[in-house]
Image: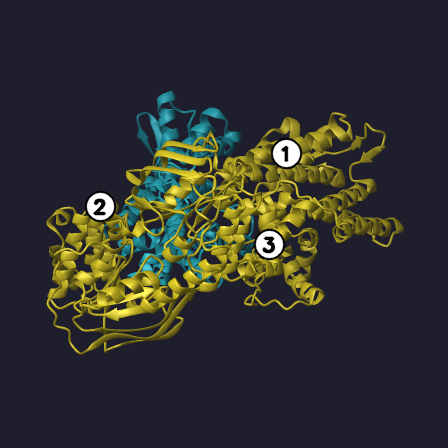
Amino acid sequence: MVFNRSLLARAALGPAAGAVLMAFMASGAIPAYQMYSVGLAAVYTMVVLSVGLLAGWSGIWSVGHPAFFAIGAYFAAYGSGHDWPLEAVVLGAVATGAALGAFLGYAGARFSVLYIALLTLAFTTVTLELINRWSSVTGGDQGVPVIQLRSALGFGTLLGGGAEAQYLAVGAAAVVLALAVPAAASGLRMRLVAAKSHPLAARTIGIAPEAQSSLSFAVSGACTCFAGVLLGLLTGFVSPEPFSLAFGISLIAACVLGGVGTVLGAVAGGIYLTWNPSLSSAVGLPQPVVQGLVLIGVLLFLPGGVVPFLAKPARSILRRVPRRPDAEVPLPAEASADHAPLRPPSEAAGSGPVLLHLEHMSVSYGGLKALEDASLTLRQNEILAVIGPNGAGKTTLLNALSGLTGNGRVSGTADFAGRPLLRARATARRRLGIGRTFQHAEVFSELTVAENVLCTRRRITPGDRADVARLLHSVGLADVADRRPGELPFGLQKRLDLARAMAEEPKLLILDEPFGGLDAGERALLARHIRRLHAGGTAVVVIDHVLDDLFSVAHRVLAFDFGRTIGEGTPDTVLQDPKVRSSYLGSVDGRTRPPEHVGERSMIRLHGVGHTYGGVIALRDVDLDVRQGIVLGVAGANGAGKSTLAGILHGSLEPARGDRKTGGTVRTSLAPEGRALFKTLSLRENLEVAAYAAGITGAPLRERLEETVQWLPARLRDRMSASAGGLSGGEQQMLAIARALIVSPDVLIVDEPALGLAPALVDEVYDRLARLAHDGLTVVLLEQLLSRAMSVCHEVAVLHEGVVAAHGRPGDPEFAAVAEAAYFNGGLEAATTAAATARTSQMN
Amino acid sequence: MRGANALFHEGGTVSQFLLVLVSGVASGAVYGLMGLGLVIIYRATDVVNFAMASLATLGLYVALSLHDRGVATVLGILAAVAITVAAGLVVRETVIRPLGQGQLFSALVVTMGVSLVAESTAGSIWGDQPKDFPSLVDGTVRWSGAAVPVQSLVTIAVAAVAMALVGYLFARTTLGSAMRAAAESADTARVIGLSSQRLARISWALGLGLAALAACLYAPRSGLVPTALVAPLFRAFAGIFLGGLTSMYGAVLGGLTIGVLDNLAANYVSASFRDTFVFSFTVLVLLIRPQGMFGTRTFQRV
């Protein structure tokens, strides 16, 4: 923890305000009848702070705090009745609160928000019942007095309900606030927030969410119990009445009102709770009504709370820096001047000692084998690329290496740096020296860029801050170090993900689709970065679909399909392996194209269509004309923008740019990627629901259902009442197409029907599609394998990085080469240019 | 559970056990109905409706006012259901929908706010003094030497019929299939063109209707105060968590389990610590099986 001057100043604000307040109290400026309220506000502030920071930092919303509050108060009462010293009462209450909180936090980490709500609700209910019935200790609903508590250390005697208690409450609140301020800047808070905002990513940097939530709940419970002791002293009398569940709801209202997770917000919340009764009588409504309306109003109109709402303009005036999320981030001079050789000298690679050795590793989820019998060896000085089509098991391999296989069964052996890897928990693998990034840049959205990297450390020294600043500079994030990741474009989020994985200099870096979603400049920068890491002695395992970039950095390539290794080689040779090549392109077999009777009528016409997801470009300037009776293929690698195009053609996705026109009333129907069946519904219900959604009911529905069932293969017709989840992949695909057919569409759009299917089933699905086309149905087929698209379609458009890179007729002898070049490199010209660039940079 | 406590000294241990069991199943039927309502709303809209009980309380007061004016009890119950459903739909359209999709916690807290307002409003219109709520039927029947209150049997029967109707709706009708489909995957439902808002409204109406019915069955035994339904709501919560939160069977079986346990604990362990017993049991089960008895474990993939 670093105590810089502004932090110290802010931490001193609490005690200073407390001292001023106490001076006012002593001078008599505060009327006597309000003295009690001031003390109560101080106590409430501590409780609201406990609830609010627990929610804001750990994401645990507790309705159990009335119980902690009550436990503290009854400790005071019992201590007073049994002549315990003040210190023993406080220690006992704090220890009890911490122990119960630690248990609730640990148990709660296993559950979702709602389960924690129930858990804490149960805790409150049980505690209140015990308090009400255990009369010998608590006095039941009669209550017990708190007469006095004598200090064992000679600080005198505190009378229950006396003025000293009011001063003590204010002083205690000031100290707690003073402690909360530096805690908010500490690594502890960063780790708590990291564990809350992305538990899985947190594990990969060595943070265990259970331990974090247990710790924070323990502190929160202890603080609330302490506040309870003060409440007992303040009121001089403890009864069950104030500790109702309604108080728990009021506490949440106070937190939300002030601003969850802010220290100042807690003060506002405490004040609101104290004077809520006066507020209610002022507006002439019952107190619960006012509380309810405030709660609803704040959540609807000021979900961030009052304090952050007011602080925002104040801070932006102070900072005077315009916040422009789209601002160009200049590349660091160091990085752009870096002319590392295109590929590291080969004698450096593959000669080092073995770092990672996998043997016969399999991962299965239920009956599904996501990874089967994978073996690989990685040397210390090597960049290994893993390629394969969608569903080949690449990500599963990475997850197995970083310990994120969830409830999957992992078998086989893995040695990392001479130690068995598989037995190590995910949180321990960071310490072994494994860092990883994620396909979608899973960064901690509630931390700043710098904090995202800092939170990898348990205790943060000034040296750490300097290291992190240097690291951020080296990836070009220095200028945005204080921003939240959400304000940054996707490319910078990916750099942040990489920086976080690189902090603490791991021995092995695992990169999950690092090039995906980046533009050409960013990809070149990333490639340079990976080479620099390698030069620094880091081994890298990288998977991606962007093959040209991947091959420009890798020393060795491993190809996967259906969860197995199907080939291995250097970037230059691996695609010459026919098995590897056909896993991408498919093999052309004797499949016949349906006879062409393409009409002139345009069913759907796209013009200049583009689409983005949160800054990532998915489609750019697409023109497409779907004519009646055609079988139009759209081929492209994973991530080329096929599913986006499918949604736009279907009409269920509104394009961000460009327009979609239909020729008259055209009913479109989509069989989405991955089938998207309702697995808990029966086969028949899946079909019925689709017809119902299209407005078909009653007799016409039964008629359509009958016809559609006839279309299904016989083995499905007999199982119409079975649930769709039990079908095999091929059967599910058949049902998904049938579901699209039941509404009698004019255009059928099928997104990757062959995904994850065994070859025989692929043939069956394609035969059925061909027969539909034969009967005159207009079909748009989105397909990962180019050759498959070429073999069945009348026309094929090749999609590469969101652009139609080639469009032609498979019958045209020249089109095959053009399409293949477009598929891998975005076109013949692009390929030539890329090769030329590669040659030039190699010469440098 | 006044009836059960007063009666349990009458017969032998067997008939006493029978009484406790019938009383437990009757309570469990009420918790199960409420839980079913909660689950239907939760599955369709991701909202844990804390306000369900207090909205149903409004319905109960209206029914009681009608009863005092001489309207038949059955019509009063129908009015209670209608009022509760209407109030619930107003709440959804005015304060839940503007929150947007997927606001699990905010939605829960907003319904807490609604319940504070509704309870307080009921208190200021009808007073905080306990009132008697009419039973559908009075009297007892002799069964194996025990005097079983007919109202308990009617409660069980009515709840069973209501559950069977809900079961029929969801299992046998296209509307029910559509509701299950939308609950399973809102995204896919959108792709095939289901109107999610319409289904959400139907689910809210159904859920609140069930809650109002449960309230009308529960109130004769407990008496009516503005907070009368808080206790059964909590037990219904315990029931649905026990059942797995998204399973309708789970809600019913969880509610029944809680009801029977609750009555067994009150009669054989300690009447003072029944909630302690019920909630400790629930938490223990959840610690061993976090997904509940019928819930499915979810696994987050990167």
Check the residue under mark 1 and report the chain it is in: A
Q: Secondary structure at mark 2?
A: loop
Q: Amino acid at mark 2?
A: Leu
Mark 2 to mark 1: distance in Å? 50 Å
Mark 3 to mark 2: distance in Å? 49 Å
Residue at (58%, 52%) from the top-left corner? A447
Check the residue under mark 3 and report the chain it is in: A
Horizontal side of residue A767 vs B223, given as left or right: left
Q: Which chain is yellow?
A: A
Looking at the image, can residue A238 be seen?
Answer: yes
The residue under label 1 is A98
Q: Say few, some or many: other residues with alpha carbon within 10 Å of mark 2 (under 14 / 14 to 19 / 20 or more).
A: some
Q: Colour of chain B?
A: cyan
Horizontal side of residue A313 vs A606, given as left or right: right
Q: Quadrant of residue A69?
A: top right
Q: Measured along the vertical axis of the image, is residue A807 above or below residue A579?
A: below
Q: Nearer the viewer, residue A311 or B242?
A: A311
Q: Amino acid at mark 1?
A: Ala
Q: Residue furthest top?
A: B12
Percent of width and height locating residue A473: 61, 56
The residue under label 2 is A727
Residue at (19%, 57%) from the top-left corner? A738
Do the residues at discs 1 and 3 belong to one chain? yes
Residue A472 disc label? 3
Do the residues at discs 2 and 1 belong to one chain? yes
Q: Amino acid at mark 3?
A: Leu
Percent of width and height locating residue A380: 47, 39
Mark 1 to mark 3: distance in Å? 38 Å
Q: Residue furthest right?
A: A27
Percent of width and height locating residue B225: 51, 47
